[in-house]
């Protein structure tokens, strides 16, 4: 099973200016988050970000914030550690649309419930969430678990995640893998989104990862 750019969305969790200096390997983690944001732009993957209690922890790192805006992304301010509790999943799902007018399509009471068509239908969306962020064992993990509970497919970009300590970071990865998340790296994401050296964005993506 490989990532598909056409089915993916990217979520970047809490890369905030006042938090990052305390994070283990923060320079590498931030550099990979920036690569992911630029990859999303090149591959036309929707991009979302969050900030935790921005009055205390400040905004997203300035360079990363610029890349998010360049990709047309939006940033969710939150207080819950799990961003789903502040509405992230509503951003990631397409709005429901009304069923087209016309005669009822199998909603007769005599039909089994699983065969009845709802009055509203969800448009087909991108259910694969590529996610990275800080701290790995708090906001990143809780948000990823929340998205799994919402039946999204979750891929965690490990080299773009960290915590204040290496032990907490690694414990988060263990727990996420056990819960069903896929663990990947930035380069895995890049080359799986590309799939082929014939892709029009190949040279630009190669420049990012090298």
Image (spheres, rainbow, N blue to C red):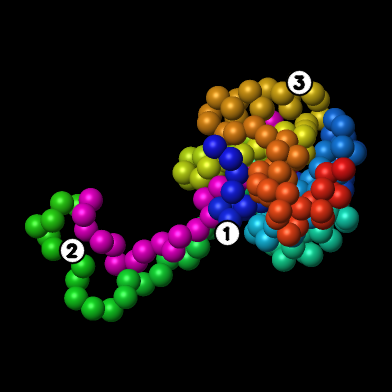
- Residue 99: image location, x then y, percent: 32, 71
Q: Nearer the viewer, mark 2 or mark 3?
A: 2
Q: Earlier in the sequence, mark 1 or mark 2?
A: 1
Q: Earlier in the sequence, mark 3 or mark 1?
A: 1
In this picture, which residue range is highlighted in magenta? 114-139
- Estimate the spatial distance between the alpha carbons at disc 1 and disc 2, rounded to whole Å: 31 Å
Callout 3–callout 1 Cβ contact below 8 Å: no
User: Would residue 132 appear left or right of 142 to someone viewing this image?
Assistant: right
Q: Secondary structure at mark 3?
A: helix
Q: Residue 106 — which label?
A: 2
Q: Is residue 7 above or below residue 118?
A: above
Quadrant in the rendering for residue 156: top right
Q: Secondary structure at mark 2?
A: loop
Query: Does residue 15 appear in this view?
Result: no
Tell me which residue sits at (60%, 30%) in the image.
Answer: 176
User: Would residue 124 appear left or right of 4 to someone viewing this image?
Assistant: left
Where is mark 3, residue-wise?
Answer: 167
Q: Is residue 109 above or below residue 155?
A: below
The quadrant of the picture occupied by the N terminus is top right
- Residue 111: image location, x then y, percent: 13, 56
Where is mark 1, residue-wise?
Answer: 91
Residue furthest to the bottom? 101
Tell me which residue sits at (56%, 47%) in the image.
Answer: 128
Quadrant in the rendering for residue 27: top right
For the residue carrying disc 2, how many other residues have a C-alpha within 10 Å: few (<14), some (14-19), or many (20+)?
few
Tell me which residue sits at (73%, 36%) in the image.
Answer: 185
Q: Nearer the viewer, mark 1 or mark 2?
A: 2
- Residue 146: image location, x then y, percent: 54, 41
């Amino acid at each position: 099973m490989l990532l598909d750019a056409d089915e993916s969305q990217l979520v970047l969790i809490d890369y905030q200016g006042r938090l990052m200096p305390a994070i283990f390997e923060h320079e590498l983690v931030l550099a990979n988050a920036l690569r992911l944001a630029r990859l999303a732009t090149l591959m036309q993957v929707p991009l979302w970000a969050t900030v935790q209690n921005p009055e205390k922890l400040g905004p997203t790192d300035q360079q990363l914030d610029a890349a998010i805006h360049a990709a047309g992304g939006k940033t969710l301010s939150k207080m819950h550690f799990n961003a789903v509790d502040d509405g992230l999943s509503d951003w990631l799902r397409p709005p429901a649309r009304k069923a087209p007018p016309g005669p009822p399509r199998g909603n007769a009471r005599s039909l089994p419930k699983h065969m009845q068509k709802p009055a509203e239908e969800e448009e087909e969306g991108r259910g694969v969430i590529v996610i990275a962020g800080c701290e790995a064992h708090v906001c990143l993990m809780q948000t990823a678990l929340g998205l799994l509970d919402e039946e999204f497919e979750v891929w965690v970009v490990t080299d773009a995640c960290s915590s204040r300590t290496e032990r907490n970071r690694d414990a988060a990865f263990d727990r996420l893998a056990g819960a069903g998340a896929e663990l990947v790296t930035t380069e895995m994401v890049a080359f799986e989104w590309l799939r082929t050296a014939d892709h029009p964005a190949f040279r630009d993506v190669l420049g990012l990862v090298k």
